[in-house]
Amino acid sequence: MNAEIKDWAMDPHRFALNGLVQQHQNKERVAVTFTTPNKRPKGKERTEEIKFIEDFLKLQDKVVIGSAREQQIKLTNSQRYQKRAINQLVKGVRAVAGGSEM
């Protein structure tokens, strides 16, 4: 889980998309556009491009965070079941050691 989050945070494609948003905000010429064929978008086109990229990054964030949350839930559940199994084992050992039947 930690490796996945680290990879997500240090993803070069993520940095490139953030750089692209910065270029749009600085009203610079961009190499790639997603919502328009115009390499020098203006006004509303530029705003739509920024919104598109930011929404994509938010979606990616939700996927990674959801995956991490799911892994955490699985870990918590497995620890709970493991604790219960150990408690049942201890209970059985005590019953056998005490000479009583389970």
Image (spheres, rainbow, N blue to C red):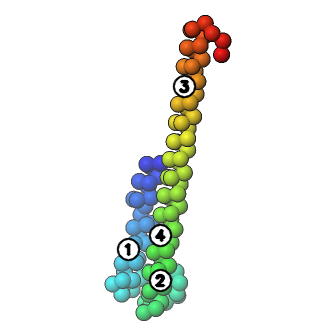
Camera-side residue of 39 and 90: 90
Query: What distance separates the C-alpha of mark 4 from that of mark 2?
Result: 13 Å
| Residue 26 percent across, percent down from the top left | 33, 84
In which image quadrant can residue 8 be found? bottom left
Q: Is residue 39 visible?
A: no
Left or right placement of residue 89 versus residue 55 in this view: right
| Residue 39 percent across, percent down from the top left | 46, 87
> Could you tell which of marks 1 and 3 lies nearer the N-terminus?
1
Neighbours of disc 2 within 10 Å: few (<14), some (14-19), many (20+): many
Three-letter amino acid code at disc 3?
Answer: Asn
Q: Which of marks 1 and 3 is in front?
A: 3
Q: Are marks 4 and 2 in contact (CB under 8 Å)?
A: no
Q: Residue 19 carries which label?
A: 1
Residue, disc 2: 49
Neighbours of disc 3 within 10 Å: few (<14), some (14-19), many (20+): few
> Could you tell which of marks 4 and 2 lies nearer the N-terminus?
2
Residue, disc 3: 87
Query: What distance separates the C-alpha of mark 1 from that of mark 4?
Result: 12 Å
| Residue occupying image coordinates x 52% and y 57% | 66
Three-letter amino acid code at disc 1?
Answer: Gly
Query: What distance separates the C-alpha of mark 3 from that of mark 4?
Result: 45 Å
Q: Which mark is residue 57?
A: 4
Three-letter amino acid code at disc 2?
Answer: Glu
Three-letter amino acid code at disc 4?
Answer: Leu
| Residue occupying image coordinates x 54% and y 36% | 80
> Could you tell which of marks 1 and 4 lies nearer the N-terminus?
1
Q: Residue furthest top?
A: 99
Query: What distance separates the C-alpha of mark 2 from that of mark 1?
Result: 13 Å
Query: What distance separates the C-alpha of mark 1 from that of mark 3?
Result: 54 Å
